[in-house]
Image (cartoon, grey):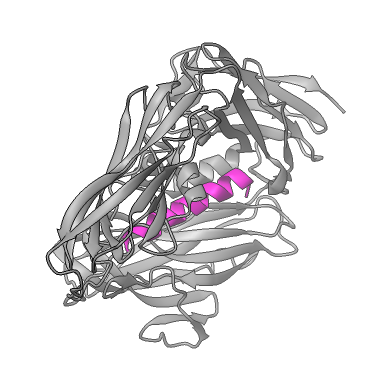
């Protein structure tokens, strides 16, 4: 599997597992529930290390919801003559108060009889019983991971199916079959390009290069460009799809020892008021056409739309690959997936400077109560923030609450922190000069703080104005100043989503976040 395909599979796994990870009580076994299981379609390389495949399912629970037992059987006898299959993890999602155990492995035992909660292996069959939270109609949720590896004597052309049978509670069984085959091994190698520097108002050009570093002819490839199509200029090519990224397919035959490049570069429009030093970091990823076809065939439209957005084909001419240096029919898979992705960086030079000022708050609350505060930042310009375009345009502001106060919930803030008294947040809005981005937080006041808190903005570059980088947070206590916080929710009743700032920034560069907390 190519690096690109592997990352997409990982993203799909995260999306699938997130669906079933809600803390709710169990209900009576469903009798009318329907389930449609699906094992990921695969093409293996002879002599390769194999791939990790995902087992997912769609379910219709009607009007009921709760934790249900899902029973499923994976029969790989159809490929046992040329491949080995290992159950690496069965996933269950069981609510435990305010926690969940989504992603916890379920043990596998070698026995002819399935356990009540877990999996058993017998011959070329796995039998599993897991608990999953289900509600209404769930278009997809993850059930398990399987390692599939070709045997030493596997050859191109070997093919078979994996059969999956599943049921929910006392509902009817449903069966599906997914193809697994052995193809030719190829080795695509992406070539690193030079960093691109552009000034505001100009068009930066992004060009991808790919080499066939193996000894086998590559019959067609696919390319993924991780940049929002909204910022692209020029032709929308007919052999490309545009959604959250750009995905192009080429029927070009790549000869061994030969390098190819895009016949035309992608144009990236740099806004006139882009901030100096803004950077867009993306990449060209390449995979065989077979692997891309496997991905599209394996997953439902709902999941593909979640990852790639509403993909629309271009209406212009066809983008071609042209040969720049030299040295069919059979399905192909990459032998070395570590070298088929190349990073691309576009940096803005000569852009405007932007001065960011922290926005604090002052409120009055009673000890033992909750209060709302609103903190964030304002862009004094003259440059404008474009977080959907430039990865480093997500401005970080650090929040230090006053002593004896704790955050108890947030609106749409995306934040990170080790505790509930101090944390950091990343801005997500495109912010023009004079624009404000502030967020609401619910704060529990344990007793009189005695000191102020603060909000500190991290400038992207030296604006020459540092006095406004910090603002105070003042919480005055009216009446008694030493009342305890009571109630079963403790300090995190609503909960603040605590994510790594680096992860936030990378994620928000690709898509907008919904409310958290």
Question: Residue 441 location in percent, x, y?
Answer: 26, 52
Q: Which one is in front, 137 or 472? A: 472
> Which residue is more in the foreground, 50 or 197?
197
Q: Which quarter of the figure is the C terminus placed in?
A: bottom left
Residue at horizontal 57 percent and vertical 46 percent from the top: 5
At x 51% / y 51%, what residue is drawn?
Answer: 9
The x, y position of residue 447, in whole percent, is 23, 68
* Residue 354 position within the rendered picture, expressed as x and y whole percent measured from the top left: 47, 25
As drawn, 93 above or below 16: below
Label tally = 0
Q: Is residue 110 above or below residue 417?
A: below
Front residue (pair 155, 40): 40
In-image side of 14 versus 139 (left or right): right
Q: Residue at position x 79%, y 40% from top? A: 214
Q: Is residue 403 left or right of residue 259?
A: left
Q: Main secondary structure of the magenta part?
A: helix
- Residue 51 against residue 327 in the figure, above or below: below
Relative vertical location of residue 227 with respect to residue 419 in this rendering, above or below: above
Residue 52 lies in quadrant? bottom right
Region in magenta: 1-20
Q: Quadrant of residue 286?
A: top right
Question: Residue extending furthest right?
Answer: 327
**x, y percent for residue 60:** 22, 59
Nearest the camera: 243 or 497?
A: 497
Q: Is residue 388 visible?
A: no
Residue 11 among magenta residues: yes
Q: Is residue 261 magenta?
A: no
């Amino acid at each position: 599997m190519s690096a690109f395909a592997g990352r997409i599979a990982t993203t799909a796994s995260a999306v699938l597992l997130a669906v079933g990870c809600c803390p709710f009580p169990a209900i009576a076994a469903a009798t009318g529930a329907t389930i449609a299981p699906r094992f990921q379609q695969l093409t293996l390389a002879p002599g390769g290390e194999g791939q990790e495949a995902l087992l997912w399912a769609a379910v219709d629970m009607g009007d009921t919801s709760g934790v249900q037992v899902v029973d499923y059987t994976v029969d790989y006898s159809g490929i046992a003559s040329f491949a080995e299959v290992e159950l690496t993890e069965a996933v269950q999602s069981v609510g435990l108060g305010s926690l969940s155990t989504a992603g916890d492995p379920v043990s596998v035992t070698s026995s002819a009889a399935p356990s009540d909660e877990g999996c058993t292996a017998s011959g070329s069959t796995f039998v599993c019983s897991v608990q999953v939270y289900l509600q209404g109609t769930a278009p997809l949720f993850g059930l398990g991971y399987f390692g599939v590896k070709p045997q030493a004597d596997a050859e191109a052309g070997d093919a078979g199916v994996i059969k999956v049978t599943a049921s929910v509670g006392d509902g009817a069984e449903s069966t599906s079959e997914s193809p697994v085959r052995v193809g030719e091994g190829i080795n695509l190698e992406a070539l690193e390009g030079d960093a691109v520097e552009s000034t505001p108002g100009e068009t930066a050009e992004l060009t991808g290069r790919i080499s066939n570093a193996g000894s086998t002819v590559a019959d067609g490839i696919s390319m993924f460009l991780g940049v929002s199509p909204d910022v692209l200029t020029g032709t929308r090519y007919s052999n490309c799809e545009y959604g959250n990224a750009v995905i192009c397919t080429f029927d070009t035959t790549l000869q061994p020892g030969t390098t190819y490049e895009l016949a035309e570069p992608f144009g990236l429009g740099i806004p006139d008021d882009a901030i100096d030093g803004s950077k867009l970091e993306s990449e060209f990823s390449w995979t065989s056409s077979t692997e891309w076809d496997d991905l599209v065939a394996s997953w439902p439209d709902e999941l593909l739309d979640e990852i790639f957005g509403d993909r629309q084909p271009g209406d212009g001419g066809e983008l071609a690959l042209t040969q720049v240096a030299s040295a069919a029919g059979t399905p192909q898979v990459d032998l070395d997936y570590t070298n088929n992705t190349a990073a691309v960086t576009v940096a803005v030079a000569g852009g405007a400077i932007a001065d960011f000022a922290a926005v604090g708050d002052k409120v009055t609350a009673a000890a033992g109560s909750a209060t709302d505060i609103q903190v964030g930042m304002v862009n004094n310009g003259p440059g404008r923030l474009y977080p959907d375009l430039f990865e480093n345009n997500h401005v970080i502001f650090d929040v230090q609450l006053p002593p004896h106060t704790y955050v108890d919930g947030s609106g749409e803030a995306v934040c990170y922190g080790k505790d509930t008294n101090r944390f950091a947040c990343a801005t997500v809005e495109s912010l023009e000069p004079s624009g404000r981005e502030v967020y609401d937080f619910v704060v529990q006041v344990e007793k009189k703080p005695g000191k102020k808190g603060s909000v500190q903005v991290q400038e992207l570059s030296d604006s020459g104005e540092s006095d406004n980088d910090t603002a105070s947070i003042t919480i005055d206590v009216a009446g008694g100043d030493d009342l305890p916080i009571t109630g079963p929710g403790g300090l995190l009743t609503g909960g603040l989503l605590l994510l790594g700032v680096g992860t936030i920034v990378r994620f928000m560069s690709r898509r907008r976040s919904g409310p958290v907390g």
